[in-house]
Image (spheres, rainbow, N blue to C red):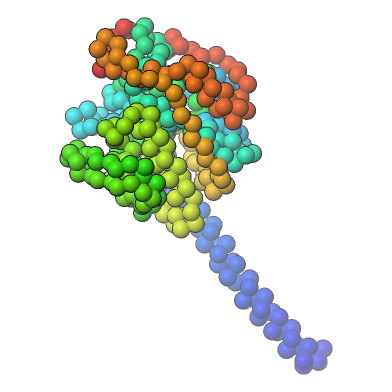
């Protein structure tokens, strides 16, 4: 081999090194960050994980669902943890301030969401009289809330995520805010219950944590249905923001912050699978329940339209590719005819 060939070979080796070394560094950084996230997730899941009394699967399923492989459903429950009712993690004995049922389809890489108005007049399993769905959590915690939603739509709720106001604020704060198209002016109290502390003008804008919470909570601007639509907007904005490349370095802090203010039946393995799944979601559709305002025994309720419930149930079942198996145990909770206002 002559000198010219030797020089060419050395230059080629140097070029390969220049290409390979950065790739190795990136790979090591990715593996390191993955290990860091796994460590954070392990700590968070040990704090947050709470299984349902039914066990690892819905009674409407023949087999347990793996979100890493299967289509699945998640019930997102936001808890009204006002200070005078605060219990462990702000959960026990409190009502739900927001309920969103979401279905995930892996093949379509899509999500469908429906918000259930907190005053919806529904049958709560194990109770004699119909009541507001928000009271299911006060009566029987997340177990009864999940049972009630399954009973309402006749489809399985595979997983749940329950958060209080602190978790919501921390999520939006860690992400640096969320982008929302505000449809109308909002004037609402803040997280410390100071009246008219938050004012949000109409238009596309980036909401900070307090503004996002006020936007999701307000009930004075219009109706419970519109309130549910705003909550779905915020959830969709959080999903979109968290899947941006710029948000990936924030995952560790995000996981650490919400561990004390969240409970879920997702396992550590489920959470790791979801990190990969979230990046591929390209279609989020919001569904809306129809109904009308009503008063029963001088108490306000939102009466759901039966056909609307059926239509949304069928859409979610199709999205889950769920044909209907298993049975719902509606007698697992003690019966009583008392009503919470």
Q: Is residue 105 left or right of residue 213?
A: right
Picture residue at 52% right of the left edge, 34% below the top: 112
> Where 205 sits versus 283, above or below?
below
Image spot of residue 243 (x, y percent): 49, 50
Q: Which of the two residues, 255 or 243, is positioned nearer the viewer here?
A: 243
Question: Given the current orientation, which residue lies at the most extreme right position?
Answer: 1
Question: Which quarter of the rendering shows the N terminus?
Answer: bottom right
Residue 70: image quadrant is: top right
Question: Which quarter of the rendering shows the C terminus?
Answer: top left
Picture residue at 52% right of the left edge, 40% below the top: 284
Q: Which of the two residues, 295 or 100, is positioned nearer the viewer here?
A: 295
Q: Which of the two residues, 141 or 284, is positioned nearer the viewer here?
A: 284
Q: Is residue 169 visible?
A: no
Picture residue at 64% right of the left edge, 76% below the top: 17
Picture residue at 54% right of the left edge, 22% below the top: 311
Total count of labels: 0
Image spot of residue 285 (x, y percent): 52, 37
Image spot of residue 332 (x, y percent): 43, 12
Q: Is residue 182 visible?
A: yes
Residue 105: image quadrant is: top right
Q: Is residue 203 left or right of residue 2?
A: left
> Where 322 sits versus 247, above or below?
above
Image spot of residue 218 (x, y percent): 29, 35
């Amino acid at each position: 081999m002559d000198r010219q060939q030797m020089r060419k070979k050395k230059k080629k080796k140097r070029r390969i090194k220049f290409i390979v070394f950065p790739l190795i560094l990136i790979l090591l950084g990715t593996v390191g960050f993955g290990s860091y996230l796994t460590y954070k997730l392990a700590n968070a899941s040990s704090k947050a994980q709470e299984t349902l009394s039914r066990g690892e699967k819905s009674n409407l399923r023949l087999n347990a669902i793996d979100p890493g492989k299967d289509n699945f459903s998640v019930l997102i429950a936001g808890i009204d943890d006002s200070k005078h009712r605060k219990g462990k993690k702000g959960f026990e004995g409190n009502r739900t301030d927001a309920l969103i049922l979401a279905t995930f389809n892996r093949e379509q890489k899509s999500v469908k969401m429906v918000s259930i108005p907190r005053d919806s007049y529904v049958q709560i399993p194990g109770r004699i009289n119909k009541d507001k769905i928000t009271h299911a959590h006060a009566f029987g915690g997340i177990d009864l809330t999940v049972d009630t939603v399954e009973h309402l739509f006749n489809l399985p709720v595979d997983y749940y995520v329950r958060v209080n106001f602190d978790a919501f604020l921390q999520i939006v704060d860690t992400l640096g805010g969320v982008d929302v198209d505000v449809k109308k002016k909002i004037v609402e109290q803040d997280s410390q219950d100071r009246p008219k502390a938050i004012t949000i003008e109409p238009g596309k804008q980036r909401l900070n944590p307090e503004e996002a919470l006020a936007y999701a909570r307000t009930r004075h601007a219009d109706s419970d249905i519109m309130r549910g639509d705003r909550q779905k907007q915020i959830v969709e904005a959080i999903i979109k923001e968290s899947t941006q490349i710029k948000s990936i370095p924030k995952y560790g802090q995000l996981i650490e912050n919400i561990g004390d203010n969240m409970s879920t039946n997702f396992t550590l393995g489920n959470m790791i699978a979801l990190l990969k799944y979230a990046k591929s979601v390209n279609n989020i559709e919001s569904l809306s329940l129809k109904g009308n305002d009503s008063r029963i025994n001088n108490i306000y309720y939102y009466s759901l339209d039966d056909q609307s419930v059926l239509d949304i149930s069928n859409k979610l079942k199709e999205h889950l590719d769920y044909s209907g198996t298993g049975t719902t145990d509606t007698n697992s909770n003690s019966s009583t005819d008392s009503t919470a206002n």
